[in-house]
Amino acid sequence: MKKYIRIASGQGYWGDRFDAPLDQVKEGPIDYLVMDYLAEVTMSIMQKQKSRDPNLGYAKDFIPLMKQLLPLLVEKKVKLITNAGGVNPVGCMIAVRNIAEQMGYSGLKIAAVYGDDILNQLDPLIASGNEMKNMETGEPLQKIRRTVSSANVYFGARPVVKALEQGAQIIVTGRVTDTGISLAPMIHEFGWEWDDWNKLAAGVIGGHINECGAQASGGNFLAGWKEVPRMERIGFPIVEAYPDGSLIITKHESLGGLVSERTVKEQLVYELGNPAEYITPDVVADFTSIRLEQEAENRVRVYDIKGYPDTEFYKVSISYFDGYTCIGQLTYAWPEALEKAQKADDIIRKRIEYLGLTFDDIHTEYLGYNACHGSTAPPIKDPNEVVFLIGVRGHDKQMMQKFANEIVPLVLTGPPTVTGFGGGRPRVRDVIAYWPALLKKDTVSPKVLTIEVV
Amino acid sequence: MKIPLLKLAHARSGDKGDTANVGIIALKPEYYEILKEKVTVEKVKAHYGDMVKGKIERFEMPNIGAINFLLHNALGGGGTLTLKHDAQGKTYSTSFLRMEIEVDDNLQID
């Protein structure tokens, strides 16, 4: 057994810095590279792409990235685990296989983890008594069934471990949790049992630290962002995992960024619910057990982690169409910039009334004044400029378009010294809303397919 | 004396649907006790007023000197529904740290 393994985060979300994964492989020793691509909205977009072309439905820009990444992974014997497979992991695997074949990497094993996409099984699932009630509102899925555009179960580490056991070096998955892709290599390498809850929880916490990329290594760091070295080449985090379930959070020395107790703590609390019950498909991790210790520069030890048995449910991520939004903006300059923006708001609201438009929500903000901090922000006397933002949400597309048409006319009909209308009419956008639900684990099973490049 | 929390804590915030989470973290171990005593649910409710429309939950994490808050119905519907500029509640971290608390006049602050 290896004394430890190094699992590097290559991406915090789809659209993160493109050269980070390349740097992670090039700039120092790692054993695994993990990359998270998926958000709720992403699944819906990918489902739409797949409906137009059955070969698509995965993160398209993962393929050109693989052309650069694959030679490095092969040379350094680094394994890659990513959920870039979206709603078509098998299609993604084939696209990667084609590249690997062209580059002559015969013998390379590539795996797809799938079975999470339950869009076509929703009706039988509902019919057999799985209501998939919204976890926030308690309403049954049937209520919005017709507008559902994607439905995916969150799998944990299990199918990824299976792919590793089959010898895959590249693993593309569908909706596997962000934490599962970091946990899986630890289980595989150290032979952890599926009921060794403390160790599984340690892997999940390592995954939570990795899952947002540089947010654990100096990015978005409130307690000292000015002291973070070379943010233009920020080193993404590396979790050095040990068989006993302790971790060292670090980064490559040659890159910028910072790993300290403070940077790790900020990431630990990010998007956290009840810290004593961090629920994943594999284990319930207890964030109130974690101990931290700065062991050396850019090395933080994370240890003493506790975990508890997993629940009998998978979480399901369902997306559905829920109307439209449209947000318009104009910039007003000094003097009396705020008063002008407020007048513009008054005019737009009167126009909405005059035109007989109705919306589910109308919302105004004054950017540069208090859009971020609202009533907690102290007043500013006579700001130099204020951006007036007004948004509406509704289900009637014609009314949405009529609203969109009302913004730019204010330039010639409303308060003076107004600019920032270069974009013309604001766009009416579809709202793809999110329906979180639970599903009994025994109703779906993950699938793994491993192929070898010839 | 009255000081803003910013002097005693750092923070990060994010979203889960229409709920914003704010984790506040003591800058020094000795500040954690002050946070624990002074930053109550009632205090947070008063600080945010209408900005937080639902309930507020509070979870202590003495192991890392932090308190995690869940601010329900604080993101204008959340996710893709919201019309808020800060749709994911990313800036709730520092609006939270604007909160003023009463501390001992002799408290050492950097």
Image (cartoon, coloured by chain):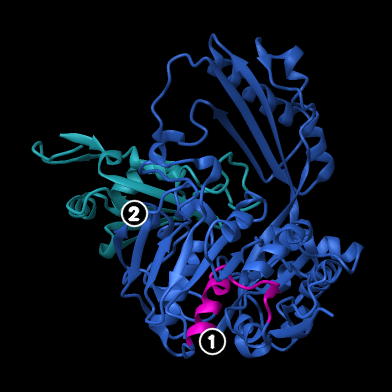
Chain colours: A blue, B cyan
**Which residue is nearer to you in this view: A230 or A325?**
A230
Q: Is residue B40 left or right of residue A200?
A: left
Q: Which residues are magenta?
A: A168-190
Q: Amino acid at mark 2?
A: Glu
Among the 4 quarters of the image, the one containing residue A386: top right
Task: Decide: is A85 above or below B99.
Answer: below
Instruction: Say which of A253 and A47 sits in front.
Output: A253
Q: Residues within 10 Å of mark 2 (few under 14, many from 20)?
A: few
Say what amino acid the circle numbered 1 marks: Glu
Q: Which residue is mark 2?
A: A297
The local secondary structure at tag 1 comes to: loop
Which residue does the image show at 48% across and 30% down from the upper left? A370
Residue B16 seen in the figure:
yes
- Residue A188 magenta: yes
Residue A108 placed where, x, y %?
Answer: 75, 77
Q: Which residue is mark 1?
A: A312
Label 2 marks a residue whose chain is: A
Q: Quick check: B91 above or below A405?
A: below
Could you tell me residue A295's position as x and y percent? 30, 61
Q: Residue at x 39, y 78 (%)?
A: A245
Would you place residue A132 above or below residue A178 in this image?
A: below
- Disc 1: which chain? A
Q: Position of residue A447 (x, y in %)?
A: 72, 85
> Residue A452: which disc?
none
Regarding residue B73, the answer to whether it shows in the image is no
Q: Nearer the viewer, mark 2 or mark 1?
A: 2
In the rendered image, which quarter is residue A195 located in? bottom left
